[in-house]
Amino acid sequence: MHIELYTDGASRGNPGPGGYGIILKYGEKIKEISQGYALTTNNRMELLAVIVGLEAIKWENMRVIVYSDSKYVVDSVMKSWVFNWQRTGFKNKKNVDLWKRFLKIYDKHQISLQWVKGHADNPWNNRCDELATKAADGNNLLQDTIFEQEYYAR
């Protein structure tokens, strides 16, 4: 058995209010997770969706297939860019806080990432998009503190 993790991120403006949507599938069991943020970017929400989804898995060393419509996330991992960034101390890279968080959880599972076309014929990705945009438009928005500190320091 393996876990299927579907993710999507959204941002109303870039930066702007944003959110992520997650669906975890293990056999017949399905869990949905979403959260919104007051000020963030689309790439941060795409990456955070993957991280939170992986962190929600209770067992270690699971085979996990992550489905994302984010080339930024999928290519960064599957083309090993993030591992090179790690070796060079993430010099001149964005979202370092999230990439470091991702790398902590990445080693706990057997993970592969699969790109899916967004807003297309994948019902799970479409549902994640609904969850992400609803979260971004919601009233229960959290602060993306690290992003906001960097954003306002410019």
Image (cartoon, helix red, strand yellow):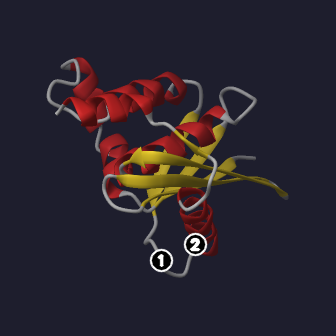
The residue carrying mark 2 is 126
Marks 2 and 1, Cα distance to the nearest angstrom?
Answer: 6 Å
Left or right relative to 4: residue 30: right
Q: Residue 77, relative to residue 29: is it above or below? A: above
Q: Residue 77, relative to residue 108: is it above or below? A: below
- For image coordinates 28% across by 22% down, the residue present is 86
- For image coordinates 59% across by 38% down, the residue present is 52
User: x%, y% of residue 82?
Assistant: 30, 33
Q: Residues within 10 Å of mark 1 (few under 14, many from 20)?
A: few
- For image coordinates 59% across by 57% down, the residue present is 135
**Label 2 element class:** helix
Residue 77: image quadrant is top left
**Label 1 element class:** loop
| Amino acid type, callout 1 | His
- Looking at this rendering, what residue extends furthest in the bottom direction? 121
Left or right relative to 85: residue 110: right
User: x%, y% of residue 99?
Assistant: 38, 31
Q: Nearer the viewer, residue 25 or 52?
A: 52
Badge 2 or badge 1: first in the primary sequence? 1
Residue 92: image quadrant is top left
| Amino acid type, callout 2 | Asn
User: x%, y% of residue 148?
Assistant: 35, 35
User: x%, y% of residue 144?
Assistant: 45, 36
Left or right relative to 96: residue 130: right
Residue 149: image quadrant is top left
User: How many numbered badges does the structure rendering display?
Assistant: 2
Label 2 close to label 1 by CB (< 8 Å): yes
The numbered disc on residue 119 is: 1
- For image coordinates 16% across by 34% down, the residue present is 154
